[in-house]
Image (cartoon, helix red, strand yellow):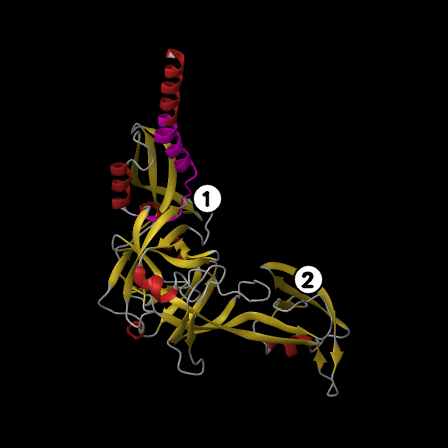
């Protein structure tokens, strides 16, 4: 009986040791640098014992040599018992700039940097959705480049193309029409449109972030490289509620032949970036917030901002998982929708809500990116660190 009691005590002590020391240290050692942070984050780490009761953190500047020049960089140093260095992580010191809070749907039109294959009459190795980037080693920036690049070609050309974001090469036989023009035997386009949600707008520069994940070519999954792009006003005309195994969607319309409201300069893994001509067309200029880095993100209460009801509203969610992420990824957080108003309106998270700002303690900490197909009340979010 006594041995069993001692064994139980030993087990409990080992469990407490693992839970209070080993697990936090494991999280710390997996922490990668490059994220937003400020002095309040450091204070919060020490106050809440985020990485264990024996670990203390300190923000400091470090001088590095970059390209022969000395550059000052910020870092957080984590020390065991306050004096034994465990880890240093580089951070981007969070600026004190204000950002307008998004939440409104916007229309997006992109001209791709390359030609997107629509159909292949030549029966070549190319498939619908492949993006032709080079012909005979020369870059295809837009459709009008192709006739010029084919002008000196004879029976075949070398085609470089993207498929599932990987680069490939193939030889393609050409033919000539009655006028003697060289043809590839392909139908191609260089434009793609979509709808997403605006996340934030820099109050000073009007630079914006939206969507939280890239615009991709539907058939190939290619992230569409941007040659140029435009932002348009968008009208919400209906909502298909999300259900199990049916994510639902926002039904929106916009006119791409209207005057552009802004310029898109990048389409990357973490969304759309660009500059708005007039932020007041999309946001309430009385509503601003700071950005919050991933180190300050906590499990628990947070909010989604959206205008799907017709007005700007905040909806209650609960963050149930926040990853430290060794590599940047657009599935940084997992959250659950708690707000009955949003559940009644949409059933949870639906397509078109990607980019909706996620707020915690008054800061923009990320954006909605994906919905759980088997449970529309749950969704993924990306840290705002990656979006900027």
Could you tell me if the residues under marks 2 and 1 are in contact, i.e. CB atoms within 8 Å? Answer: no
- Magenta region, residue range: 16-37
Q: For the stretch drawn in magenta, what is the main secondary structure?
A: helix
Label located before the other in sequence (2 or 1): 2
Q: Which residue does the numbered mark 2 point to in the structure image?
A: 169
- Is residue 234 visible in the rendered structure shown here? no
Mark on residue 326? 1
Q: Is residue 334 left or right of residue 182?
A: left
Estimate the x, y position of residue 226 in percent, counting from the top left.
Answer: 50, 68
Estimate the x, y position of residue 352 in percent, counting from the top left.
Answer: 42, 67
Give the farthest residue toward the left.
Answer: 286
Q: How many marks?
A: 2
How many residues crowd mark 2 within 10 Å: few (<14), some (14–19), many (20+)?
some
What residue sits 47% from the left and 47% below the top? 327
Quadrant (top left, top right, bottom left, bottom right) of the C terminus: bottom left
Residue 224 inside the magenta-drawn segment: no
Please tell me whether residue 133 is drawn above or below residue 302 in the rendered image: below
Spatial separation of the CA atoms under disc 2 and disc 1: 32 Å
Give the farthest residue toward the front.
Answer: 1
């Amino acid at each position: 009986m006594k041995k069993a009691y001692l064994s139980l005590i030993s087990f409990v002590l080992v469990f407490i040791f693992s839970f209070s020391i080993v697990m936090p240290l494991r999280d710390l050692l997996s922490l990668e640098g490059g994220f937003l942070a400020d002095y309040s984050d450091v204070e919060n780490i020490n106050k809440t014992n985020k990485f264990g009761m024996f670990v203390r953190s300190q923000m400091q500047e470090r001088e590095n040599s970059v390209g022969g020049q000395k550059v000052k960089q910020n870092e957080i140093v984590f020390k065991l018992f306050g004096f034994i260095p465990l880890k240093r992580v580089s951070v981007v010191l969070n600026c004190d700039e204000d950002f307008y809070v998004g939440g409104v749907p916007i229309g997006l039109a992109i001209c791709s940097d390359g030609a997107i294959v629509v159909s292949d009459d030549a029966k070549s190795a190319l498939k619908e959705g492949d993006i032709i980037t080079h012909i005979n080693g020369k870059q295809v920036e837009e459709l009008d480049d192709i006739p010029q690049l084919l002008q000196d070609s004879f029976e075949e050309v070398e085609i470089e193309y993207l498929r599932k974001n990987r680069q490939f090469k193939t030889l393609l036989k050409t033919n000539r029409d009655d006028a003697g023009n060289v043809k590839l035997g392909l139908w191609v386009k260089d434009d793609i449109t979509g709808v997403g949600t605006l996340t934030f707008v820099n109050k000073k520069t009007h630079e914006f972030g939206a969507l939280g994940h890239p615009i991709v070519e539907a058939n190939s999954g290619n992230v569409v490289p941007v040659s140029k792009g435009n932002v348009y006003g968008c009208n919400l005309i209906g909502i298909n509620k999300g259900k199990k195994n049916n994510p639902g969607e926002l039904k929106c319309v916009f006119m791409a032949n209207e005057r552009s409201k802004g310029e898109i300069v990048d389409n990357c893994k973490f969304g759309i970036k660009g500059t708005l001509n007039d932020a007041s067309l999309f946001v309430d200029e009385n509503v601003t917030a700071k950005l919050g880095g991933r180190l300050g993100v906590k499990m628990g209460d947070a909010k989604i901002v959206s205008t799907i009801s017709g007005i700007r509203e905040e909806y209650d969610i609960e963050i149930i998982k926040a990853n430290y992420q060794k590599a940047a990824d657009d599935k940084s957080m997992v959250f659950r929708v708690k707000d009955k108003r949003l559940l009644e309106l949409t059933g949870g998270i639906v397509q078109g809500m990607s980019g909706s700002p996620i707020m915690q303690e008054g800061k923009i900490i990320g954006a909605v990116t994906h919905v759980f197909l088997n449970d529309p009340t749950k969704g993924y979010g990306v840290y705002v660190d990656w979006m900027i």
